[in-house]
Image (cartoon, rainbow, N blue to C red):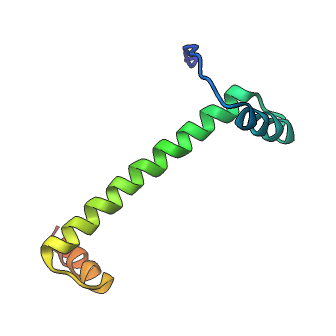
Amino acid sequence: MAIKFKNINIAFPEDLLKEIDRESGFESRTRSDLVRESVRVYLNTARWQRIREYGEKKRYELGLESEDQVEKIIDEYRGKK
């Protein structure tokens, strides 16, 4: 199944566009490809950041002070399944 694309317009400051062009040239890629990958990386990073923040919030709520305590709870939980 072919991937469907939708064209959008994005405005970049000239200095950033020069960096995009330079990097895409180094990698023999198109601007679009480089920007798509950059957005994917950003979204993945943001997603993991939210997961880490959730984990920190839960750790605080449970009064856990070390990663060893977290691992112990995980091990206990997995042992019950």
Q: Is residue 30 left or right of residue 51?
A: right
Coordinates of residue 57 in the picture (x, y in percent):
22, 65
Looking at the image, how many numbered discs can be counted on the residues? 0
User: Where is 9 relative to 24, above or below?
Assistant: above
Q: Is residue 81 left or right of residue 13?
A: left
Q: Residue, x 55% and y 37% (percent of image)? A: 39
In this rendered view, identify the residue nearer to me: 22 or 13.
13
In this rendered view, identify the residue nearer to me: 40 or 68.
40
Q: Residue, x 58% and y 13% (percent of image)? A: 7
Coordinates of residue 45 in the picture (x, y in percent):
48, 51
Q: Quadrant of residue 20?
A: top right
Q: Residue, x 85% and y 36% (percent of image)? A: 25
**Quarter of the image where the N terminus is located:** top right
User: Where is 81 relative to 23, above or below?
Assistant: below
**Quarter of the image where the C terminus is located:** bottom left
Q: Residue, x 73% and y 32% (percent of image)? A: 17
Coordinates of residue 12 in the picture (x, y in percent):
65, 29
Q: Is residue 64 left or right of residue 11?
A: left
